[in-house]
Amino acid sequence: MTFDDLKKLRLREHRDQTGLYFAEGEHLVLELLRALPDTPKLRATQVFVTHEYESEKLPQPWPSQLPLQRLSARQMAALSDTRSPQGIIAVVPMVEPISPRAGERVFYLHEVQDPGNLGTILRTLAWFGNFRCLLSPQSADLYNPKVVRASMGAIFHVPIEREVTPETLRARYPRLALLDLNGQPISATTFRTFDAYVFGNEARGLPAEALELLKGDTYSIHGARQIESLNLAAAVNICAYELTRPQ
């Protein structure tokens, strides 16, 4: 891969064409290394470092299955999505999600727009474990550098499916819980019994047409209502905790 090819990965179109994306920074690369045993396809990752990073900061011992390639500091800055590049960046292959696992919980995000929110949600799902994330069409680009960075490496550990239409969701998961402002409390015992959990857009929530199409049961996170709504990532956090906490 030439340096010009690498620079093109900053564009979503080129990421989708090549099936490759950037994971920048030491923490993300170390999380990728942790995921290698469970996801062999990640071994096709290419890791690029500056001379300074390799000589002064490179974690030791470095695994032989991921040989290093060198870039100048200027080249690294041209690829970086941050103001102060750390000196290490990986070009990672997009990986198909694993098959559903026993006891797996499914969260469906309908047109999530904010990259930081999406990354934070993935981080939450990785923390609680055994969650699958489904993204509707017109959602934020999963491989946007801001999403990857905000996920803190969760993108390597959570099974994620893109472009899942509401119709497909309904066919795969007959019993749906829809998070809405006017529903039963999530503390209800029935909340744990659904096949999948549906969350709406940050600004609009679940539109009326989606509520009608999905025909699920509505649930709410009840609060004081001193403000209009709860942040989407916070809502996911609360629901994931509710579904996994000991009874």
Image: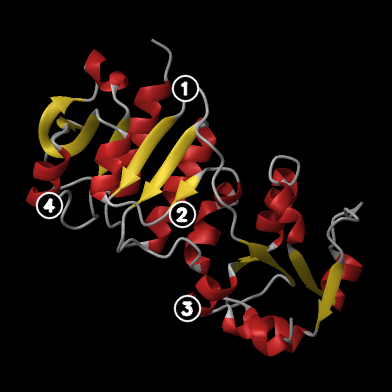
SS at mark 2?
A: helix
Q: Is residue 151 above or below residue 128?
A: below
Name the N-terminal-most of marks 4 and 1. 1
What's the residue at 67%, 74% (across, down)? 85
In the picture of the structure, the residue carrying the numbered disc 4 is: 207
Name the N-terminal-most of marks 1 and 2. 1
SS at mark 3?
A: helix
Name the N-terminal-most of marks 2 and 3. 3
In the picture of the structure, the residue carrying the numbered disc 3 is: 13
Task: State which mark lies toward you, 1 or 2.
Answer: 1
Residue 99 in the image, given as x and y percentages of width and height:
53, 37
Furthest residue toward top: 247
What's the residue at 68%, 55% (across, down)? 27
Name the kind of residue labelled 4 in the image. Pro
Name the N-terminal-most of marks 4 and 3. 3
Name the kind of residue labelled 3 in the image. Glu
Name the N-terminal-most of marks 4 and 2. 2
In the picture of the structure, the residue carrying the numbered disc 1 is: 103
- Mark 2–mark 3 Cα distance, whole angstroms, equals 20 Å
Q: Is residue 246 above or below residue 7?
A: above
Name the N-terminal-most of marks 1 and 3. 3
- Mark 1–mark 2 Cα distance, whole angstroms, equals 23 Å
Name the kind of residue labelled 2 in the image. Gly
Are dots 4 and 1 in contact, CB under 8 Å? no
Task: State which mark lies toward you, 4 or 2.
Answer: 4
- Mark 4–mark 3 Cα distance, whole angstroms, equals 28 Å
Q: Tag on residue 119?
A: 2
Local crowd at mark 3 within 10 Å, few (<14), some, or many (≥20)?
Answer: few
Q: Is residue 226 visible?
A: no
